[in-house]
Amino acid sequence: MSASVGLAIQCVGIFLVALLSISMRGSIKSASLKCWTRAWLSLSIALISLFVGFHVVPGHTLFYSIYFFGEYAFGLMFIGGCRYLASGVAMSHRCYSLLIPAALVALALPWLSNDFNDLFMVQATIMAVLFAARRFYLRT
C-alpha cells in the first residue's frame, strides 16, 4: 500500500469522526464536544491539505502550511475540550490567541526544507511538546 492510499484512508476516517461529532452536537450540548468537533474538523482539513500538497508540486508549501496549522489547531482544541471536561474551564480568548504563533510557525516551516520528511520530524517534535504540555497543564 502506498503512502497516498494510507493518507487517503486517514483523511476519510478523520472526516467521518468529524461528521459524527457534528451530528452528536445536536443531541449533546457540551463545551467539550464543541471543542472536539472543531478539533476533528481542523485535523480533517489538515489531512486533506497534506494529500493535496503531496499531489500538487507547485504551491505545495501553501498546502503544507495549512496542514501544519490544522495540526496545531487540532492539538489546541483537543486539549481545550479535555480541559473543560476535567475542570469545567472553557477555552478563553487567551487560549485562542495561541493560534497566532502557531500560524507563524506553520507559515515558516515549509520553507526550512524541500523534503517533507525533514519537516515532519520538526512537526512531530512540536506536537509531542504540545501534548506533553497538556499533561503538565491538566495534571493528569
Image: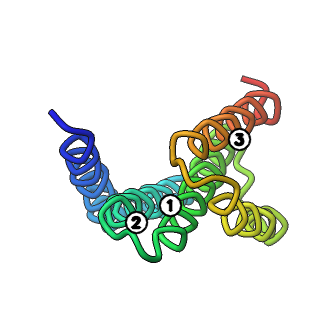
Image-based side of 4 in relation to 130, left or right: left
Secondary structure at numbered mark 3: helix
Residue 39 appears at what percent x and percent y? Answer: 50, 57
Distance of label 3 from label 2 (alpha carbons)? 19 Å
Q: Farthest left residue?
A: 1
The number of numbered discs placed on residues in the rendered structure image is 3
Give the x, y percent position of residue 134. 73, 36
**CA–CA distance in space, label 1 to label 2:** 6 Å
Q: Name the residue under label 2.
A: 49
Q: What residue type is labelled 3?
A: Ile
User: Which residue is more in the foreground, 52 or 94?
Assistant: 52
Q: In which quarter of the image is the C terminus?
A: top right
Which residue appears at 28% of the width and 53% of the height? 11
Sequence-first tag of 1 and 2: 2
- Mark 2 secondary-structure assignment: helix
Q: What residue type is labelled 2?
A: Ser
Q: Which amino acid does label 1 sit on?
A: Tyr
Question: Could you tell which of marks 3 and 1 lies nearer the N-terminus?
Answer: 1
Seen in the picture, residue 74 relative to 42 is either above or below; the reply is above
Classed neighbour count for the residue bearing mark 3: other residues with Cα under 10 Å, few (<14), some (14–19), many (≥20): few
Q: In this view, does 128 lie to the left or right of 100?
A: left
Q: Which circle marks residue 126 in the picture? A: 3
- Residue 91 x, y percent position in the rendering: 72, 61
**Disc 1 target residue:** 67
Question: Mark 1 touching mark 2, by CB under 8 A?
Answer: yes
Neighbor class of circle 1 (other Cα within 10 Å; few <14, some 14-19, many 20+) is many
In this rendered view, identify the residue nearer to me: 33 or 8. Answer: 8
Q: Which residue is drawn at 42% across and 75% down?
A: 58
Left or right of 54 in this view: 91: right
Residue located 34% across and 70% down the image: 56
In terms of sequence position, does the residue under pointer 3 or pointer 2 come before the other?
2
